[in-house]
Structure formats: structure tokens, C-alpha cells
Image (cartoon, coloured by chain):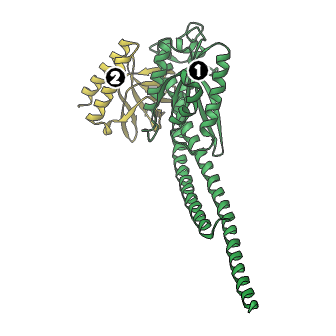
Chain colours: A yellow, B green
Amino acid sequence: MAGHLQFDLVSPERRLASLTATEVQIPGADGDLTAMEGHAPTITTLRPGVLKAIAAEGTKAYVVTGGFAEISATGVSILAERAVPVEELTAPLLDRLIADASEATAVAVDKDVADKAMADLLAMKAATGF
Amino acid sequence: MPSLKDLKNKIASVKNTRKITKAMQMVSAAKLRRAQEAAEAARPYAERMGAVIAALASGQGEGGPRLLSGSGRDQTHLLVVMTSERGLCGGFNSTIVRLARAKAAELLAQGKTVKILTVGKKGREQLRRDWSQYFVGHVDMSEVKRVGYANAQSIAREVLAAFEAGEADVVTIFYNRFQSVISQIPTAQQIIPAKFDAAETNALYDYEPSEEAILADLLPRGVATQIFTALLENGASEQGARMSAMDNATRNAGDMINKYTTIYNRSRQAAITKELIEIISGAEAL
């Protein structure tokens, strides 16, 4: 039996989730990682992707566009700029996210970063099946 | 001496005013609750964000990101003055504007360059007369029903662009911090270069990709978050201020109605007495 860790997902506007999970899969900027109980304390930035919290009562998946994750031995808190539960994700919403991102690409100071975010978003769109 | 009919009309009109101010007070009370909830809901994010940035920033020496260390100059100050779009909220806008004005005058006296970005119509109107030559922009919030993070982001983008372009060295936001319905505190908060309370770095974190990269990624977000918090606080303060202003107005209207009703009754009785005297003296004359 795996240990438990506290999973919190907050957006700037509200707390989206707060539950006990056994593992959390995080789309980190340098690659995906899974946090479980006893993980070394880590702070990582997020890339646009799918975040999964696996709990005893089921798996919750969210689409995040950016932000960062704070992992400690007993919990994970995700501070996402924008997070949407996967089941609420629709094609128009994704298109809007992509439109926002391309807007940001146009004015971005750091071209590479914005382009990468864009590519990640498109990959996510493909992965979620839209 | 106003006629009885005039007095009656006056009383009716004040009663209507009282109905309106009472309704506005009730609407504000409902909106205030919602605004407070929004501010409450945004708190965990802002706190966590502040804590992580502070922890990262305290580990950085000189030569950190420019958003943290500043542009190296202290010449051009950008003042972001956040006010409301609507009036009838007591001294809400005036207190912010007064604080901003004092700060601007102080900076000018020190020979600095002042630029003003206004958010919300009311503050712009109040500043227009004496300070319009310092205006660099205006953010219109009149279409915004509910302040969202996107609003804060667009303001932040504007501010960051000005900073990156070297058009501003120090950015300060002015808003009213909500304390209670009857008290809002006008606050000036410097957001660039970022100022954070030194945090206790208790946990040793691993950083991915690197400490510097995360900090560079987080600082712009931190600016947006601070602006968002300020907008929410401002929203709650506005409703609080309007609520107490309308409460006062309702009470004043009540006092006025009592006063006019007394005058009305007195004149009515005087008129009756006068008529009686006329009848009696007419009868005596016969």
C-alpha cells in the first residue's frame, strides 16, 4: 500500500482541488515526473500538459497551461495559471488557450520559451484527442 | 414659506431617494460578499507564490533578474492608480488619488520623472486636471463585470513591457486595502523591483530547471498576482465604501423626511388654526 500525500491545486482565482492522493503526475518543464510520498523537496515549473492526481477514489486529471509545482515529502501543491478538469475540456476552449498563447508568442520577450509553450499546447491538444 | 403641496412633493421625492440608496446599499452588500469571497479564494495562490519567490530571491545575490534587482536606475517612476469605474462610493476614490498625488508630488520634487497609468474611470477624472500631462495610459474596466486573472495579466503585461523597454524603472501600484466595511486603507505598493519579506529558507528544495530559470519565470507571474490581489482588494473596498456611503445616505434621507414631515404638520395645523380664527372672528363681528 502506497503512502498518501496531500494534493492541492490552486489557480489565481480559486482553489480547484484539495485531496489526498497516492501519486501525482506532473508535466514538468524538463519532463514529466511523478510525485509520491517521500519525494525529495522539489520546485519545478510546469509546461502546458495534463496533470494527474491518482487517489484511492479515482484519478483526477487536469489540463494546465503553466505555473509551478512545489513538491515536498508529504504533499504536492500546484500553482497553475490556468487549470481545467479534463472532462470539462472542449475544443473551443482549447482553441482559445492556443489563441492566447499565440498572442503571447507575438509579444514575448523570450521567443524560445513562448514557442516551446506553443508547441507543448499543440502536443497536448493532440494527446487529449481534439 | 413653502406651500403644503411643495412640502408634500419634497417629502415624496426624498422618500424615493431613500428607496434608491437603500436598494444600492443592499446590492453593494451582496456584491461585497462576493468580492470578499473572491479575495479569499485568491489568497492561497498569492501567498504560496510570494513565499516561493521570497525563498528563491533570498538565495540570489547581486545580479539577479532585473525584475528583482531593478534596472539599476531610479529615475522614472510609473504609478499605477487603481480606482473604481463608478461613483457614489464615498471617499473611496479620493483617498487613493490623494495618496497617489502626494507620492507624485514628492517624486517630482526629487527631480524624478513621473508617469501615471490609470485603472478605472473615476481616478482618471480626478487626476485629469492637474496631472494629465503625466498620463501614459488608461485601462478601462467598465466592461468587466467580474475581475478575473486575465484583467490583471493584461495590466501586468503593459507594466512589464514598459519596464523592459526602459520606460519605467520603478513601478508602484495604488489601491485600497480592504479592512472592514467602514475602513479601507489606501496603500502604495512597489511591485518592480520586487520587494519581498525575507523568508526563512527552511526546506532545501531541488529546482527544475534551475533556480534562476524558475525565478525568471515566476517574477512576471508574481507581478500579475500582486496586481490581481490589488484589484480584488480594491473591488471589495469599493463595495464596502459604497455600502457605508449608501447607509449614511439612507439615514440622512430618513432624517430629512422626519424634518420635512414636522414642518408639513406644523404648517397644516397653522393653516387650520388660521381658518378657525377667521370663522370665529367673522361670527363675533356679526
Q: Is residue B270 above or below residue B87?
A: below
Q: Residues within 10 Å of mark 1 (few under 14, many from 20)?
A: many
Q: Is residue B261 above or below residue B165?
A: below
* Left or right: A48 as drawn, with respect to B105: left
Residue B192 visible somewhere in the drawing: no
Q: Residue at x 76, y 90 (%)?
A: B284
Residue A126 image offset from top left, x and y in percent: 24, 26
Q: Quadrant of residue B255?
A: bottom right
On the same chain: label 2 and label 1? no
Inter-mark Cα distance, 2 to 1: 30 Å
Q: Residue at x 64, y 33 (%)?
A: B186
Chain letter of the residue carrying label 1: B
Q: Residues within 10 Å of mark 2 (few under 14, many from 20)?
A: few
SS category of the residue bearing label 1: helix
SS category of the residue bearing label 2: helix
Q: Residue at label 2?
A: A103
Give, as a three-letter code, the residue at label 1: Ala
Residue A38 image offset from top left, x and y in percent: 50, 25
Mark 2–mark 1 contact, CB under 8 Å? no
Residue B85 visible somewhere in the drawing: yes
Residue B155 image offset from top left, x and y in percent: 47, 26
Q: Residue at label 1?
A: B54
Give, as a three-letter code, the residue at label 2: Glu
Chain letter of the residue carrying label 2: A
